């Protein structure tokens, strides 16, 4: 079971990182963008470390309070829930 969780989290973080990179590329090229709700959803379903890394690596969404406050907050909540589950 634990290996499935690890695989899921790795995939979620890789996907979040990739989606932030794709959205940055689309922004530079003036193309259709990925909705902000979708970007936040990728963070919320376990990809917050990947989303945070994507924000800084691609220098994307780092000026928007919803992202520079929201994604780290999601990460902190996920860490707290993870520790709580692990302690049980």
Image (tube, rainbow, N blue to C red):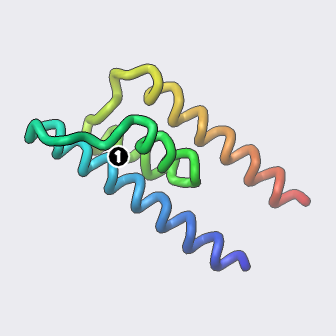
Residue 52 in sight from this viewpoint: no
Give the quadrant of residue 35. Answer: top left
Decide if residue 71 is on the left or right side of residue 4.
left
What residue would you read off at disc 1? 54
Decide if residue 58 is on the left or right side of residue 52.
left
* Residue found at the very far right of the displayed protein: 88
Quick check: 64 above or below 76?
A: above
Decide if residue 23 is on the left or right side of residue 37.
left
Q: Give the image location of residue 78, x and y in percent.
A: 66, 46
How many callouts does the rendering have? 1
Q: Which residue is drawn at 35% across and 46% down?
A: 54
Which image quarter holds the N terminus? bottom right
Q: Which residue is drawn at 33% across and 52% down?
A: 19
Q: Residue at x 65, y 79 (%)?
A: 3
Q: Give the image location of residue 60, x and y in percent.
A: 28, 35
Quick check: 5 above or below 38?
A: below
Q: Callout 1: 10 Å neighbours few (<14), some, many (20+)? A: many
Which image quarter holds the C terminus? bottom right
Decide if residue 25 is on the left or right side of residue 66.
left
Q: Give the image location of residue 38, x and y in percent.
A: 43, 44
Circle 1 sits in a helix, a strand or a loop, which is it?
helix
Residue 26 in sight from this viewpoint: yes
Q: Which residue is drawn at 68% across and 47% down?
A: 79
């Amino acid at each position: 079971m634990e290996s499935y969780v690890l695989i899921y989290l790795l995939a979620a973080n890789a996907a979040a990182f990739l989606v932030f990179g794709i959205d940055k590329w689309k922004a530079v090229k003036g193309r259709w963008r990925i909705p902000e709700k979708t970007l936040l959803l990728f963070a919320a379903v376990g990809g917050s470390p990947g989303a945070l890394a994507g924000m800084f690596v691609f220098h994307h969404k780092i000026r928007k309070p919803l992202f520079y406050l929201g994604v780290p907050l999601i990460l902190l909540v996920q860490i707290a829930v993870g520790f709580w589950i692990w302690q049980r």
